[in-house]
Each structure stands twice: as structure tokens, then as C-alpha cells.
Image (cartoon, helix red, strand yellow):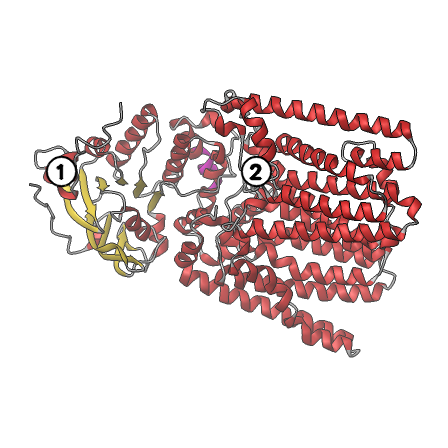
């Protein structure tokens, strides 16, 4: 039987890398996020897991300023996302799974564009872009448009875009989906180095092994609420994270008679 | 079709133009002496075949649901598929239109010329369907770049066809050189079936025999080629997808000469997308064609068309800038998350979308003033057109922020695009034409009453005020409602 672990919320949410209080979002009658509250400490690598439709992406959208909550508040690096959007966005690097970017740009052009939007000096953008493209093995892509990238290459250029301005906190939605194992390991190294340097990583993923191997904190979200959260060991309580997840969310085994004609 | 109103309406438009063309050309033939009608009938049939083949290139994807590659994993051969694919050419609106047009053309040809046309028409129909299928497969590129190029070409081709049709009609029905067209087309596959009968009616036996040879050769080669394509696409179809190398491109984003800033980056990207985004390219190519036709008609037919051209283009100048967030679509998140000041984002994006039409309006104004006989009047209209442009631009700002709607993803064929027929899209398309002249109306009225200078100044002042007011309102709108605007455009239509 899984026992929820819900640490007390910080009295001052601005001390956290990311904090949400009573965040709520409804789409018609459907409550996607239901008075969700969570603290993500600075310097942590925090995994957000949950089944499809749990509200992870909706929560991230509200934190990123892409979707307005019906109720509740969110802070990024101590700035209220809706009261002080500009400093909050400066502090944040975002990778959104499955949402297109301006894909009629090459990878380097995309980074150059982002650098220009954020007011980073041109020479600095050039230097950082070169390093990022090299680190992520995207230099060979050359002048190819992002629309012609593979799924893995697209994920990597999005990560490069999230890192370019040296944010305080990285919010990554499925950062390793469709990425090959070699690139996946490289990305994990980058994220660990980033966190070791003082940055905070928040990543949403279905891959429990990734979360278990990379993250030091985890929250399980289901039906728009946090079921359990905290240090990975406190959450899984001696079991594997997969078993803990299934224990909280529920799941069924396949009946012996079903699909009997498959051979 | 019921899920794709754009295709339905385009089909209806094609049918309408086909019927108008048939009636017009039929009247032209009727006006000729009976003995001279044979080659004119051949011209009518040849032009009909040509139009069908052009449409087959323009609307390939929405109509042709069956592709040999879809059957590659099934135990079928090209011999199994060919009869079905051949019959399937009739099972779409293009084929049905061709059959209907053939029946009607047969009635016209037999009535106006000779019963001998009953022999030619079925053959002409088969050749038409075959040529359409051959060209459709040739034009359907297998890579993204070639596919998008065809989409751009098809967009421009439609505009050229419509303009060509209108210009042909402007000759006057009695002056269309249909028999000459028929004699020329009869030596090509599109007109050879009709040419055989026309030559027989003319007792030109050698000519008939030669053109019959063209028909037979076309049928034999066309069918063989089609069978070969089916066989090739059944066998490892994925290997046929060409990897198109884009080659060396060192463009960067920022346009030359502009200072480095968030606003100029947004502007530069928007302008560069006019070349890189096929949704934009087709439209940008179409507007200059329309401008050239209006200028041409103004020079060769009626100078009033010059004035109308300036006014019309100024009023529609905001059309490309009426849905800036829609064109960016889901990628708008990049701007939201980057924390670009909303006024910078709005203005830079707006100016980028306005740039091509601004350049075109200025070009047309200068050309009209140079070409017009009444230079003073042309200059007056040109100045007022600049006011109309400001008015249209102001309206575009309001539409962009209050009426954003999702569009098709970049690269979508215009004929598979479902985004154009929402209520929001119709509003964006017609709002400027219906209301864009209003801020300029008081000044124009003064001009009409003879107070030229005060009228022009008033027109310019009111339209400028309208633009500045719209900018203020639109800025407030984006500052307070950017997430809601994003929610309206965060998914591509198809």
C-alpha cells in the first residue's frame, strides 16, 4: 500500500525555484488542474510524473505564462509569473514537448533568433550557439531547416534553445522522448552539470527509469493533484518508482483470455 | 468533402468557371458561320482539356485518395491495381466535372457543328483523364521541398488561370480566336482527338490521319507510363522519397542593414518567412499578378481601372497582416516565453506582414501616376490610397488581436487548407473591403465636392489617427490577453 508523502509547503514561496499554490485550470466542465500546490527547491533535479491527462503539461503551461489559471498563483525564481512576468520569463528556460517552433529556420538561426529576442549580445549568442550545437551534435545539421530534422534532433535543438540564455530554472516536458541513447546520456550529463552549477531542473516524463536515475526529487500527479512528492527515496519508500507510481495511480493486468488469437 | 469546406467551395468555383467557359465559348462558336465552326469546336475542347490538366496539377492531394504506395504491403500487383485506379479517376469531383463538361460539350458540338463529334468526345474524355493523371503524378513530388514548390506553383497557377480567363472574356465573345486556338492545339495531345474530327469535317485527310496518330501515341504511351509508375510505387515506395539537400545557406535571421534588437529580429524573421513559408509565398506571388492585370487593363482598356487598382490594392493591403498570431500558430509560445515586450512583438510582427503589400501599393501608385493620362487625378488617388492603406493596416491590427484564428501548418497545400472558411477567416478577408474606406470617407467627400487639398489632408489625418488608435487598442489587448490569443492559435488546423 503506497503511503503519500507530502512535505509541508514553504511559508514563503519566493524562496523556492518554482512554487505553485492552489493552481487551478478548468476546460469547460473538465478540471485539468485542481488546486495544485507544490514546491521545487533550488538546485534540485525534480521529476514530475503522472499518467496521460494528469495535468502535468497544463501545470507547466500555467507556470510558463502560456495558459492563464482560473485560480491560484505561481512563482519562478521568486517572481510571480502573472504579476512580474518579465523577470520570471528571464529566469526560465522552457522545452515544450510536441509544440512546434519556427521550423523554417535552421538550428543556428533559431538560436540566433532566441538570443535576439532575449537581448543577449550578438557575439555572445554566436559563441553559445556554437558550443551548444557542438555539445548536442547538431553542427552537422548545418543549414537544414528544423522542419527537416528528425524527432531526436528537434528535441535537442529545443533543449539548446532553453539553455541559451543561461536560465536559473529549466522546465522540460519529455526532454528525452525520441532521443537516441547516446544523445540521451549526453543530455543527462548536461542537466547534471547544470544542476551542480546551481541551476534547477524540472522535468516531466513518463520514463520512470529516467526519473529514478536522474532526479533527486519527484512528484506524482494524478487528476490534477499532487498525490505524493519529495525526495525520491521518501516517495518510493523502498519500492521501485514504477511500483510506487502504479500503486498510487492504479493499473490492471491483462486477462489471460484476452487476445488469445495472437500467436 | 464535408469536412473540408475549402475543397467543396473550390470545386464549386471550378464547376462554375467550367460552365461559364462552356457557355461563353459555345456562344462564340454559334456566332461563327456554320462552315467555320469545326475548328472552333476543336478549340473549345482543347481549352477544356488544358483547363482540366491544370486543375489536376493544382488540386492533386485533396482529390486523389488512392495511391499505389498505399498498397505496397499487400499481396497485389500492378495488373490488379491498374483497372481500379483507372476507374477511380471518375470517382472524384474532377472526373465527374470532366464527364459533365464532356456531355454538355457534345451537345453543343453536335448542335452547332456535326454529329461526327459523337466519335471524338469519348476519346477526348479518356485522353483528358489520362493526361490529368499523368501530370498529377509527375507534379506530385516525393520530398518536402518539391511538394511545397508545387503548392506555391499551384497557387500562382490558379490566379493566372482566373486572370487569363477574365482577359479572354474581355476580348468579347465575337472576337475570341477559337478556331485558331483549335488548329494549334490539335497538334498537341490536349487537342488531337478533337482535331481529328475537325480535320475530317474539313476534308483534310492527311491532317486527320496525323492527328489520329498523335491520339493513339498519347494513349499507348500514357497508359504504359502509368502502369510503370504503379509498378514502381508498389515496390519499395519509401526508397522513392528523395532526400532533398538544401545546400549551403548562410542567411541568418536579421535582415541586412537592420540594428540588432528583439523588434528587428521579429521583423526580420517575419519577412524571411515570406520566402520560406509556402503559405505566404503563394499569396505574395498572387497579389503582384493581380496588380499587373489591373495596371494592364487601366492602360489598354479603361483608365478608371488604374484608379480602381490603387484603391483596391490599398484596401486589401492589410489582408496579410490580419492574423499575425494565427500564422505563427503554436510557435507563438516562443515569443510568450521569451518575455518580449508586447508592443514590440505586436508592431514588429505587424510591420513584417505589411511589408510586401506596402511595397506593392507604392509600386502600383507610382506606376499608375506615370501611366495615367490624367496625372493630377492619378496623383490624388495615389495619395488617398496611402490613407486607405493606413486605414486597412489599422483594421488589420484590430483583427489580429481581436479575431485571431488558427491556420494550416506551413507547407500545407492551399487546396487541403481547411483554415480559410471559418467565420473568423471570412471576417478577416472581407472586413477591410467593407469597412476599410470609412476613415477616409469624409476627406474623400470633400474632394468630391471640389475641396481637394482640405479633403486630402482630412483623409490622411483621419486614417492616421485611426491607425494610431488601433495600435493603442491592439497593444492593450495583447498585454492583457496574450495567453487567450495563444489559446486560439495553439493548434494548426490540419
Q: Residue at x 52, y 39 (%)?
A: A104
Q: Quadrant of residue B46?
A: top right
The chain under label 2 reads B
The x, y position of residue A164, in whole percent, is 39, 38
Local secondary structure at mark 1: helix
Q: Residue at x 32, y 33 (%)?
A: A176
Identify the residue position indicated by label 1 in the image: A244
Mark 2 burial class by Cα count in 10 Å: few <14, some 14-19, many 20+ = some
Task: Give residue A170's mark.
Answer: none
Of residue B446 and residue B434, the one placed in the foreground of this image is: B434
Give the residue furthest to the front.
B115
Q: Which residues are magenta?
A: A121-127
Image-based side of B121 in relation to A152, left or right: right
Identify the residue position indicated by label 2 in the image: B64
The x, y position of residue B226, in whole percent, is 63, 26
* Residue B270 vertical position relative to residue B251 in the rendered view, above or below: below
* Residue B301 vertical position relative to residue B468 in the rendered view, above or below: above
Estimate the spatial distance between the alpha carbons at disc 2 and disc 1, rounded to whole Å: 51 Å
The x, y position of residue B412, in whole percent, is 54, 42
Image-based side of B36 in relation to B151, left or right: right
Q: Is A222 in the magenta? A: no
Q: Quadrant of residue B442?
A: bottom right
The x, y position of residue A66, in whole percent, is 36, 52
Amino acid at each position: 500500500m503506497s503511503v503519500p508523502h507530502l512535505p509541508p509547503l514553504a511559508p514563503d514561496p519566493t524562496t523556492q525555484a518554482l512554487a505553485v499554490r492552489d493552481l487551478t485550470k478548468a476546460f469547460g466542465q473538465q478540471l485539468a488542474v485542481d488546486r495544485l500546490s507544490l514546491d521545487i527547491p533550488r538546485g534540485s533535479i525534480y521529476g514530475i510524473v503522472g499518467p496521460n491527462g494528469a495535468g502535468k503539461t497544463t501545470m507547466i503551461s500555467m507556470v510558463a505564462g502560456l495558459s492563464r489559471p482560473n485560480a491560484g498563483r505561481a512563482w519562478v525564481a521568486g517572481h510571480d509569473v502573472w504579476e512580474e512576468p518579465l523577470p520570471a520569463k528571464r529566469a526560465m528556460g522552457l522545452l515544450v514537448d510536441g509544440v512546434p517552433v519556427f521550423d523554417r529556420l535552421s538550428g543556428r538561426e533559431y538560436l540566433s533568433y532566441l538570443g535576439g529576442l532575449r537581448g543577449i549580445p550578438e557575439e555572445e549568442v554566436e559563441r553559445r550557439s556554437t558550443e551548444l550545437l557542438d555539445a548536442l551534435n547538431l553542427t552537422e545539421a548545418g543549414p537544414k531547416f528544423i522542419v527537416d530534422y528528425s524527432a531526436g534532433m528537434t528535441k535537442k535543438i529545443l533543449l539548446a534553445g532553453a539553455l541559451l540564455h543561461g536560465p536559473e530554472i529549466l522546465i522540460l516536458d519529455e526532454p528525452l522522448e525520441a532521443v537516441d541513447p547516446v544523445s540521451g546520456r549526453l543530455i543527462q550529463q548536461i542537466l547534471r552539470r547544470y544542476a551542480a552549477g546551481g541551476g534547477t531542473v524540472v522535468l516531466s516524463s513518463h520514463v520512470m527509469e529516467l526519473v529514478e536515475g536522474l532526479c533527486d526529487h519527484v512528484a506524482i500527479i494524478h487528476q490534477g493533484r499532487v498525490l505524493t512528492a519529495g525526495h525520491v527515496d521518501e516517495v518510493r519508500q523502498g519500492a521501485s518508482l514504477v511500483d510506487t507510481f502504479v500503486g498510487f495511480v492504479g493499473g490492471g493486468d491483462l486477462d489471460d483470455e484476452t487476445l488469445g488469437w495472437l500467436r | 468533402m464535408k469536412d473540408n469546406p475549402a475543397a467543396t467551395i473550390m470545386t464549386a468555383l471550378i464547376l462554375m468557371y467550367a460552365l461559364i467557359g462552356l457557355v461563353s465559348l459555345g456562344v462564340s462558336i454559334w456566332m461563327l458561320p456554320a462552315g467555320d465552326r469545326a475548328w472552333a469546336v476543336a478549340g473549345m475542347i482543347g481549352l477544356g482539356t488544358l483547363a482540366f490538366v491544370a486543375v489536376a496539377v493544382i488540386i492533386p492531394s485533396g482529390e486523389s485518395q488512392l495511391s499505389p504506395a498505399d498498397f505496397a504491403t499487400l499481396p497485389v500487383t500492378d495488373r490488379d491495381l491498374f483497372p481500379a485506379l483507372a476507374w477511380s479517376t471518375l470517382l472524384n469531383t474532377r472526373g465527374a466535372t470532366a464527364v459533365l463538361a464532356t456531355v454538355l460539350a457534345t451537345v453543343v458540338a453536335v448542335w452547332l457543328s456535326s454529329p461526327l463529334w459523337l466519335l471524338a468526345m469519348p476519346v477526348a474524355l479518356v485522353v483528358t483523364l489520362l493526361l490529368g493523371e499523368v501530370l498529377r503524378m509527375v507534379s506530385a513530388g516525393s520530398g518536402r521541398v518539391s511538394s511545397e514548390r508545387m503548392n506555391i506553383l499551384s497557387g500562382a497557377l490558379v490566379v493566372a488561370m482566373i486572370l487569363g480567363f477574365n482577359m479572354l472574356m474581355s476580348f468579347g465573345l465575337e472576337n475570341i480566336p477559337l478556331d485558331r486556338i483549335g488548329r494549334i492545339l490539335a497538334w498537341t495531345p490536349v487537342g488531337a482527338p478533337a482535331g481529328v474530327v475537325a480535320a475530317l469535317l474539313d476534308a483534310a485527310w492527311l491532317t486527320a490521319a496525323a492527328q489520329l496518330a498523335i491520339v493513339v501515341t498519347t494513349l499507348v504511351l500514357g497508359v504504359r507510363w502509368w502502369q510503370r509508375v504503379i509498378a514502381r510505387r508498389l515496390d519499395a515506395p519509401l526508397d522513392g522519397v528523395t532526400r532533398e539537400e538544401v545546400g549551403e545557406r548562410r542567411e541568418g535571421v536579421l535582415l541586412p542593414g537592420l540594428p540588432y534588437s528583439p523588434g528587428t529580429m521579429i521583423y526580420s524573421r517575419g519577412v524571411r518567412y515570406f520566402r520560406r513559408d509556402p503559405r505566404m509565398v503563394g499569396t505574395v506571388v498572387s497579389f503582384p499578378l493581380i496588380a499587373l492585370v489591373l495596371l494592364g487593363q487601366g492602360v489598354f482598356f479603361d483608365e478608371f481601372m488604374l484608379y480602381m487598382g490603387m484603391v483596391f490594392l490599398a484596401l486589401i493591403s492589410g489582408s496579410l497582416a490580419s492574423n499575425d498570431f494565427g500564422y505563427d500558430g503554436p510557435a507563438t509560445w516562443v515569443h510568450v516565453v521569451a518575455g518580449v515586450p508586447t508592443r514590440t512583438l505586436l508592431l514588429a510582427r505587424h510591420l513584417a506582414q505589411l511589408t510586401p503589400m506596402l511595397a506593392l501599393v507604392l509600386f502600383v501608385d507610382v506606376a499608375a501616376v506615370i501611366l495615367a493620362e490624367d496625372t493630377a487625378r492619378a496623383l490624388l488617388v495615389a495619395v488617398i490610397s496611402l490613407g486607405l492603406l493606413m486605414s486597412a493596416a489599422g483594421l488589420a491590427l484590430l483583427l489580429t488581436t481581436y479575431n485571431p484564428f488558427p491556420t494550416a501548418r506551413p507547407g500545407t497545400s492551399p487546396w487541403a487548407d481547411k483554415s480559410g472558411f471559418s467565420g473568423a477567416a471570412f471576417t478577416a478577408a472581407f472586413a477591410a473591403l467593407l469597412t476599410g474606406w470609412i476613415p477616409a470617407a469624409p476627406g474623400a467627400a470633400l474632394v468630391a465636392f471640389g475641396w481637394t487639398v482640405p479633403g486630402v489632408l482630412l483623409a490622411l489625418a483621419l486614417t492616421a489617427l485611426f491607425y494610431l488608435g488601433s495600435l493603442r487598442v491592439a497593444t492593450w489587448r495583447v498585454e492583457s490577453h496574450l495567453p487567450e490569443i495563444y489559446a486560439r492559435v495553439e493548434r494548426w488546423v490540419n
